[in-house]
Image: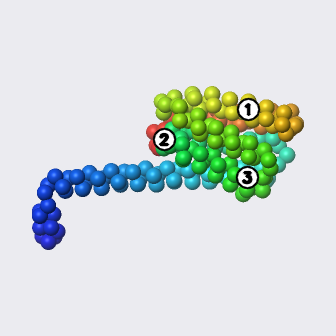
Amino acid sequence: MKKYWDYFRKYDPTFLIVVLVLGLLLLILLFSFLKAIFVVIFFVLINILLRFYKRIIPSIPLEFEVITFGSLLCTIQYDIKAGIAVAILGSLLADIANGTINPGNFVMTAGYIGVAILGVFIPVTQFGLAGLYITFFYNIVIWLIFHLLFHHDLFKNTAYSITNLIFNYFLFTSLSAIAVLIL
């Protein structure tokens, strides 16, 4: 132990303080980056698991997803890249895992990317309320695109939108404060 102490005693104390501060900053940045990667993977996996109901009951028009919540949260807490990663990976990997790839998936993924981009303009204190507004706007746009462009059945299209709004209402009103605190 004395050998190490003698080694550090040779250097100026300010140099040691600068090295310690820089090392601490690097550790914090690395931890934050790793935490962001973990959170992105978490939302992607949760969305894949949530979408398995479409394999079991494909004919019932339900839309449960955490991508809107996750991409907005990751954008606000980390950066736009994390939010877009959740949007793209969470949407497309869930559809691939469940064998439900179709042209509409790319429209929905583009919508999730839009949600992540809007997250740049939201302060963390307004996450829950802004998330509700963005979810409502997202559902209106997706409903119009699917109805007018893809000619989806009116009942199924409306049922998808309503169940998505209800599920995201629960996420943003119940979990937003906890999620912002934890992350």
Q: Secondary structure at mark 1?
A: helix
Frontmost of labels 2 and 1 is: 1
Query: For residue 142, which quarter of the picture?
Result: top right
Residue beneath disc 3: 95
Q: Position of residue 80 (x, y in %)?
A: 54, 42
Query: Is 19 in front, or is 59?
Result: 19
Residue type, mark 2 in image = Gln
Residue beneath disc 2: 77
Give the CA distance from mark 2 to mark 1: 25 Å
Q: Are marks 2 and 1 in contact (CB under 8 Å)?
A: no
Residue type, mark 1 in image = Val
Above or below, 111 relative to 36? above
Left or right of 39 on screen, residue 30 = left
Q: Which circle's residue, 2 or 1, is located before the other in the chain?
A: 2
Left or right of 83 on screen, residue 31 = left
Q: Secondary structure at mark 2?
A: helix
Frontmost of labels 3 and 1 is: 1
Q: Position of residue 85 (x, y in %)?
A: 59, 49
Query: Is 76 in front, or is 11?
Result: 11
The N terminus - image quarter = bottom left
Above or below, 49 relative to 161? below
Residue type, mark 3 in image = Asp
Residue beneath disc 1: 141
